[in-house]
């Protein structure tokens, strides 16, 4: 029997170091430029594709690391480089997870390669769930998918918002309502193939942080997709809806819906992204505090500064351990009986916000300028407590799981 260890194995160390090299040599030097340009960093994505970091194969390899640590290690290193660029590189993964979680073997094989393209012609994908009136409250979703039996097509209508890569994606995964009577249980996910008429980009958002990552509205007007674009297939959907109707009749029972299955799988990974940003800011602050002299000595000689650095590092390590635990549990098939995935995302995202703010403070005036990267990291960190479920929603999930009560 293997003994308990937190020591990474040689393969993991090798992949981590390789990714760290890419993050340090390619991502970090490009970070300020793409943050200012506020555009998708296609040349960096292409570089990532050339070396094999932007591909399904790479993520599949990390995903199937039997310890569960492959994905969090990769996310931490890439986001250590820069959050906006890293999200441009891994954003396609959220759509891919949507297909992996709900799609058939055939759908996985057909659509995921089209999400990534290849090194000569890189593509991205988008996962579109949120709507103007349905953010945390996924049950308020209005985008409708109606089946047209005569042509075996689904017709999608609605407006999605805040979609990472929305409108610029080759493949969009869209969550829509198929049975409004069933709330979130009446949702299903659809592939919208490249160049499908009726799908257009609405406004592109100008953001506070992660500005290299494209975020936009996606407008769906009579978008017709073939029947085989329903993830999981119609037979499975009909069975699922029939079960949900029976349960609704019998007083209701919680059933996982399509969007939630995607979010559950991705929460510890988002925690790892936050750890990467926090660690990056901490390292800059530690270095600065050791070299910046005031009152005739390095500022780290003051407990007021040194203790902040001690707290920052302690929080980062604690956050990483929660992320690793949740990732290990997910890969070992252990149920999240205390919402450990949400715990990891909650704590790591709050840590990134706190630690990057402390880093700005430690750098003083320089921390407030774009001469130093902590200003950008602080803006970037604010996203982690918002997307993939806000901190308040994570607390709701944890509290409900712990208590079994319908806490509101
Ligand atoms: C940069 C960026 C990228 C994104 N990428 C994607 C993407 O690729 N695909 C996608 O589908 N979505 C994406 N989103 C959307 C994101 O998931 C939502 O913004 C998020 O779920 C929050 O929804 P909301 O913004 O409507 O906030 P709201 O739900 O309106 O929440 C507003 C505030 O109220 C709080 N709140 C809400 N309900 C409760 C409650 N019951 N109890 C206590 N507090 C509550 C929230 O925590 C928050 O503080 C992205 C968002 C951003 C900003």
Image (cartoon, helix red, strand yellow):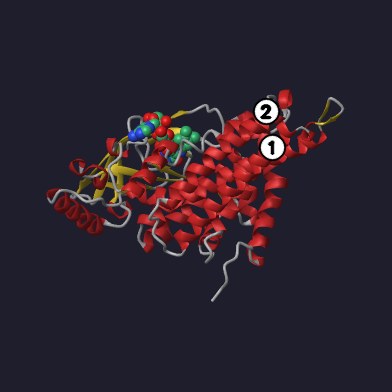
Residue 6 appears left or right of 299: left
Foreground residue, 364 or 215? 364
Image quadrant assignment for residue 356: top right
Q: Nearer the viewer, mark 1 or mark 2?
A: 1
359 shown above or below 148: above
Q: Is residue 286 above or below residue 61?
A: above
**C-alpha span from label 1 to label 2:** 13 Å
For image coordinates 54% across by 33% down, the residue present is 382
Disc 2 CB within 8 Å of nearest ligand 1 atom: no
Which residue corresponds to the image point at 57% horizontal and 67% vertical from the top-left? 4
Q: Earlier in the sequence, mark 1 or mark 2?
A: 1
Q: Residue furthest bottom?
A: 1
Asked whether, in this view, residue 148 is left or right of residue 261, the answer is left
Q: Which residue is mark 1?
A: 307
- Residue at coordinates 25% horizontally, 59% vertically from top-left? 236
Q: Which residue is mark 2?
A: 361
Quarter of the image where the C terminus is located:
top left
Given the current orientation, which residue lies at the most extreme left position? 249
Q: Is residue 82 left or right of residue 271?
A: right
Determine the secondary structure under disc 1: helix
Screen quadrant of the N terminus: bottom right
Instruction: Name the outermost residue toward the front.
Output: 303
Q: Position of residue 140 (x, y in %)?
A: 28, 35
Q: Are marks 1 and 2 in contact (CB under 8 Å)?
A: no
Q: Where on the image, by quarter, is ligand 1?
A: top left
Q: Residue at x 69, y 50 (%)?
A: 22
Residue 370, how many percent across, how many down?
A: 69, 27
Residue 190 in view in this figure: no
Dot 1, how many residues are within 10 Å of its Cα: few (below 14), some (14-19), or many (20+)? few
């Amino acid at each position: 029997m293997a003994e308990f260890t937190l020591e990474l194995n040689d393969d993991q160390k090798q992949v981590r170091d390789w990714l760290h090299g890419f993050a340090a040599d390619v991502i970090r030097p490009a970070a300020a430029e793409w943050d200012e340009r506020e555009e998708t960093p296609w040349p960096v994505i292409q570089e990532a594709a050339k070396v094999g970091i932007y591909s399904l194969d790479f993520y599949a390899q990390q995903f199937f690391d039997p310890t569960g640590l492959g994905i969090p290690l990769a996310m931490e290193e890439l986001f250590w480089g820069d959050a906006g660029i890293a999200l441009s590189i891994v954003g396609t993964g959220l759509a891919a997870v949507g297909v992996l979680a709900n799609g058939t073997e055939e759908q996985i094989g057909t659509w995921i390669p089209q999400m990534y393209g290849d090194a000569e012609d890189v593509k991205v994908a988008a996962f579109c769930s949120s709507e103007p009136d349905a953010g945390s409250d996924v049950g308020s979703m209005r985008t409708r998918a109606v089946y047209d039996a005569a042509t075996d097509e689904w017709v999608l209508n609605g407006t999605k918002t805040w979609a990472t890569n929305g409108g610029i994606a080759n493949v969009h995964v869209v969550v829509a309502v198929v049975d409004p009577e069933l709330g979130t249980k009446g949702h299903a996910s659809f592939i919208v193939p490249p160049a499908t008429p009726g799908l257009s980009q609405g406004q592109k958002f100008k953001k506070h942080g992660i500005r290299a990552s494209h975020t936009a509205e996606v407008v769906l007007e009579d978008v017709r997709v073939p029947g085989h674009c329903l993830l999981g297939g119609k037979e499975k959907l009909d069975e699922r809806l029939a079960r949900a109707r029976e349960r609704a009749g019998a007083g209701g029972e919680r059933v996982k819906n399509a969007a939630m299955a995607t979010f559950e799988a991705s929460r510890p990974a988002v925690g790892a992204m936050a750890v990467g940003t926090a660690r990056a800011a901490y390292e800059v602050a530690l270095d600065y505090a050791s070299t910046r002299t005031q009152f005739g000595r390095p500022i780290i000689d003051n407990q007021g500064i040194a203790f902040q650095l001690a707290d920052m590092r302690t929080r980062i390590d604690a956050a990483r351990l929660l992320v690793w635990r949740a990732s290990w549990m997910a890969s070992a098939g252990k149920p999240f009986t205390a919402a450990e995935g949400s715990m990891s995302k909650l704590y790591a995202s709050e840590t990134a916000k706190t630690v990057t703010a402390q880093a700005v403070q430690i750098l003083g005036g320089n921390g407030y300028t774009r001469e130093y990267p902590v200003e950008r990291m602080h803006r970037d960190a604010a996203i982690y407590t918002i997307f993939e479920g806000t901190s308040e929603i994570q607390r709701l999930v944890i509290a409900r799981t712990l208590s079994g009560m319908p806490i509101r």
